[in-house]
Image (spheres, rainbow, N blue to C red):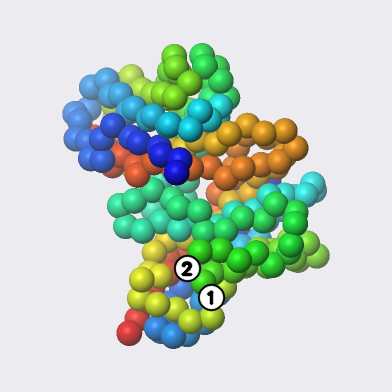
Amino acid sequence: DVKVTQSSRYLVKRTGEKVFLECVQDMDHENMFWYRQDPGLGLRLIYFSYDVKMKEKGDIPEGYSVSREKKERFSLILESASTNQTSMYLCASTPRRQGTYNEQFFGPGTRLTVL
Amino acid sequence: AQSVTQLGSHVSVSEGALVLLRCNYSSSVPPYLFWYVQYPNQGLQLLLKYTSAATLVKGINGFEAEFKKSETSFHLTKPSAHMSDAAEYFCAVGYSGYSTLTFGKGTMLLVSP
């Protein structure tokens, strides 16, 4: 089974802190994604990566950065956390295959509260 | 740009009743379509997917969905709801050659005894 793990299930941080959210997948997937989920807004894509050291902005990248130094790990960084970044953060991965689209596999999520 | 519309942010059914969750997409090219389920405080789990084979797709837990190109729809159904089906359901669309999925805003399914 594909396994996507996230470093924390719950996290509480203070305004202005630098926050790191870690995601690891064990199936050698090329593509990895970070989403935030808010009630009534569904999932919104923050960043994604299609290879090591490669990244692409999603729909809402402002206030976030990412790092992908190894294929299995994709980190989301909040440079200076703000209260409006309180949310559920979901990581996902998918293999890259020509001519088709495979489903994304999700981690359990990190519920971040910024005070 | 592609988009996904899920009609109804909340759907309530009685246990044993038919479940129908609606999803419409906008697209000018053949899509890949997915339904995911999210139980409280968990990540998303794939229920089923349409990838241009059979238009009627069967998934886990007794759910199925039918792709209707003329209606640009991919509605999710289950003949008889169980209490354990109470969760949030997301429809998503993707395309060959693109890495990303576009998700709908989700529909919360409430099941009453």
Q: Quadrant of residue A112?
A: top left
Q: Closest to the observer: B52 or B90? A: B52
Residue B39 on image: x %, y %: 36, 58
User: Which of the 4 image quadrants contains residue A3?
Assistant: top left
Please tell me whether mark 1 sits on a helix, a strand or a loop. strand
Q: Within 10 Å of the Cα at label 2, are there few (<14), some (14-19), or many (20+) other Cα atoms?
A: few
Q: Is residue B3 visible?
A: no
Q: Please tell me the numbered disc located at residue B61.
A: 2
Q: Quadrant of the C terminus of chain A?
A: top left
Instruction: Describe residue B7's horizontal placement relative to residue A67 as left or right.
Output: right
- Under mark 1, the amino acid is Lys
Q: Amino acid at mark 2?
A: Asn
**Decide: marks 2, 1 in contact (CB < 8 A)?**
yes
Residue B47, compared with residue A99, is above or below; it is below
Provide the residue designation for mark 1.
B78
**Label 2 to label 1, Cα distance in Å?**
9 Å
In the rendered image, residues at marks 2 and 1 fall on the same chain: yes
Where residue B96 sits in the image (x, y, percent)? 72, 39
Q: Earlier in the sequence, mark 2 or mark 1?
A: 2
